[in-house]
């Protein structure tokens, strides 16, 4: 199976600058915290502000400020630094390429299949996570959000808790896949009805509260290759036409 992937930066994917900024700030703050701890406990910095027998008002105020700084600054710098390092790790994780369902099982899919990831539709309305071209025509493969993150499953929209703890409203994944299949069918098929490309849609997931629809298959992550092999070949889609479709898809990456 051939895999062609988009080189575009995914929408919402953290930039390298954002990653390195969080990393540098985090390391700097943690280092500053360690240096302050050394000054307070190793270099006896705080001993200079110990009260004398008859301290002046200035000495009392400066001593209070020094003790406050010594007790709070190292911990404050350290906590903020660790938080920035955690942010840098999250951004690094978000930058790693996501392995799509068909790519994950590429060894089980025939050599006459081509999988394209990150396909931007010509009208710019959507970036398809995965589009498979094979003897059957084309297939849209998308994924359900984790079942534990879904708060409500409506006919048109779902409420999903994202990694930051916020709640987002998304389009019903099965309805979205059906719409994507219609968009791809209109894009790949010319006005001549004799050359219409058959387009199938599937959503991958194991949410027991979701059922397949007549237009969209619901399959287990391990059944992607089996589902693709079960699709009937399109007789009107010869090798030349399929190569033309692959070139058309490649141009959208």
Image (tube, rainbow, N blue to C red):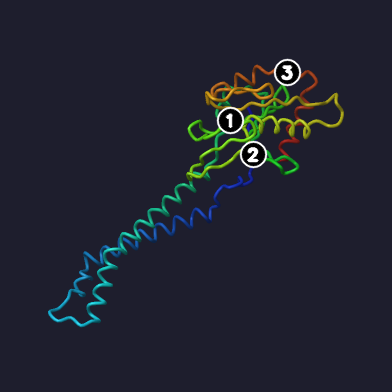
* Disc number placed over residue 206 in the picture, else none: none
Residue 3, picture quadrant:
top right
> Which element is circle 1 on?
helix
Query: For the N terminus, which image quadrant?
Result: top right
Whether residue 86 sits left or right of residue 107 in the image: it is: left
Q: Are marks 2 and 3 in contact (CB under 8 Å)?
A: no
Q: Judge whether residue 244 can be spotted in this image.
A: no
> Which residue is under mark 3?
233
The residue lying at 65 percent from left, 16 percent from top is 230
> Which residue is under mark 2?
118
- Cα–Cα span, label 3 and label 1: 21 Å
Q: Give the mark nearest the N terminus, 2 or 1.
A: 1
Whether residue 224 sits left or right of residue 183 in the image: it is: left
Whether 20 is drawn above or below 233: the answer is below
Whether residue 203 sits left or right of residue 38 in the image: it is: right
Tell which tag, 2 or 1, sits nearer the viewer: 2
Q: Judge whether residue 156 can be spotted in this image.
A: yes
Whether residue 162 sits left or right of residue 36 in the image: it is: right
Residue 182 lies, in percent from the top left, at 74, 31
> Which element is circle 2 on?
strand
Q: Nearer the viewer, residue 217 or 225?
A: 217
């Amino acid at each position: 199976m051939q895999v062609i992937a988009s080189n575009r930066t995914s929408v919402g994917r953290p930039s390298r600058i954002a990653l390195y900024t969080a990393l540098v700030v985090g390391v700097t703050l943690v280092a500053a915290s360690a240096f302050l701890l050394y000054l307070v406990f190793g270099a006896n910095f705080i001993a200079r502000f110990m009260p004398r027998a008859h301290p002046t008002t200035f000495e009392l105020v400066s001593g209070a400020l020094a003790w406050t700084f010594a007790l709070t600054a190292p911990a404050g710098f350290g906590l903020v630094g660790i938080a920035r390092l955690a942010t840098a790790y999250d951004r690094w994780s978000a930058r790693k390429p996501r392995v799509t369902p068909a790519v994950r099982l590429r060894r089980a899919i025939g050599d006459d299949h081509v999988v394209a990831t990150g396909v931007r539709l010509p009208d710019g309305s959507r970036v398809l996570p995965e589009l498979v071209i094979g003897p059957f025509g084309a297939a849209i493969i998308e994924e359900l959000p984790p079942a534990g993150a879904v708060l409500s499953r409506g006919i048109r929209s779902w409420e999903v808790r994202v990694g930051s703890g916020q709640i987002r409203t998304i389009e019903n994944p099965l309805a979205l896949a059906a719409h994507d299949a219609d968009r791809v069918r209109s894009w790949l098929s010319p006005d001549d009805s004799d050359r219409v490309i058959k387009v199938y849609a599937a959503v991958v997931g194991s949410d027991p509260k979701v059922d397949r629809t007549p237009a969209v298959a619901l399959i287990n992550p391990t059944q992607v290759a089996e589902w693709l092999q079960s699709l009937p070949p399109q007789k009107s889609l010869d090798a030349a036409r399929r190569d033309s479709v692959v070139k058309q898809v490649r141009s959208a990456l």
